[in-house]
Amino acid sequence: MEELPGRSTEMILRTLIIGLMAVALLVSCEEEDSMSLDGFDEQEILDARKAKDELFKGDDSPIKSHLRDAFTGLLYFEPDADYAVDAVFVPASRVDTFTMQTTSSELRQTLRVGSFSFEIQNKKMSLFAYQFSDGNRDSYFVPFTDRTNGEGTYKAGRYLDVKVMDNDSSYVLDFNMAYNPYCAYDDNYSCPIVPRENDLSVAIKAGEKK
């Protein structure tokens, strides 16, 4: 399978999402009333979705060119505060090198840098956090699968990007920001496959739909 030149475009999208999250965090520090205490910010979510739709209408879109004129926006679950959960990041005692499979023959070298522990739907869960060996270190890559895959969401799972917070183990994992890999729109892209260790036993009805 030939890999399209989409990695740089996907990095633009990830940077856009992380940037919007950082702006929302800064605003929340200055105006606490604008954001609920659990970190859920519906307007932030809607703004990120609008920005992504605009990106997908342009030349760098993963949507095939002959379909872009008819593109009116991606499908999402409604923003839901129940899916913005408090999480504790536990750094790995020893950072492991992890070879992540992709949808092509390419292998991506990553670092398994820690894990997030959290509770959702009254169940204790955890997800491993990764960083790409050839990428930056300002965010954690948190891919996951759940019980909606193949039904309401993309069959191969979705991704979260979590901005690194220095010297702080307390995070909010906002599954409303979960997004599809580019392979959901064009299977010529080479996308990381979600490791089995990041399978959740619940249905995450938040974020981007298929």
Image (cartoon, grey):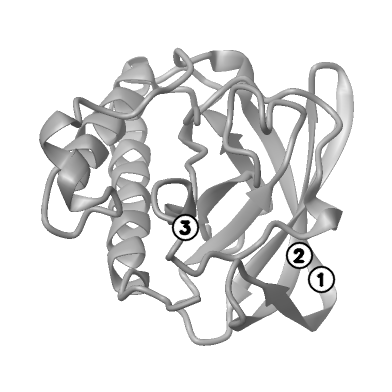
Q: CA distance from mark 3 to mark 1?
A: 33 Å
Amino acid type, callout 3: Asp
Q: Are marks 2 and 3 in contact (CB under 8 Å)?
A: no
Q: Secondary structure at mark 2?
A: strand
Left or right: 26 in relation to 105? left
Write down the residue under mark 1: 92
Q: How many numbered circles does the render carry?
A: 3
Q: Secondary structure at mark 1?
A: strand
Q: Nearer the viewer, mark 2 or mark 3?
A: 3
Q: Are marks 1 and 2 in contact (CB under 8 Å)?
A: yes
Q: Residues within 10 Å of mark 3 (few under 14, many from 20)?
A: some
Percent from the top left, x then y, of residue 77?
48, 17
Q: Which residue is located at x 69 percent, y 61 percent?
A: 129
**Mark 1 or mark 2, which has the lower sequence index?**
1
**Relative to 143, residue 75 above or below:** above
Task: Place residue 117 in its image quadrant.
Answer: top right
Percent from the top left, x then y, of residue 76?
43, 22
Write down the residue under mark 2: 114
Left or right: 70 in relation to 81? left
Q: Which residue is located at x 35 percent, y 15 percent?
A: 33
**Mark 2 or mark 3, which has the lower sequence index?**
2
Q: Which residue is located at x 30 percent, y 75 percent?
A: 5
Amino acid type, callout 1: Ala
Q: Nearer the viewer, mark 3 or mark 1?
A: 3
Q: Which residue is at the front of the view, 108 or 71?
A: 71
Q: Secondary structure at mark 3?
A: loop
Write down the residue under mark 3: 187
Q: Residues within 10 Å of mark 2 (few under 14, many from 20)?
A: many
Q: Which residue is located at x 64 percent, y 39 percent?
A: 155
**Mark 3 or mark 1, which has the lower sequence index?**
1
Q: Are marks 3 and 1 in contact (CB under 8 Å)?
A: no
Left or right: 117 in relation to 6? right
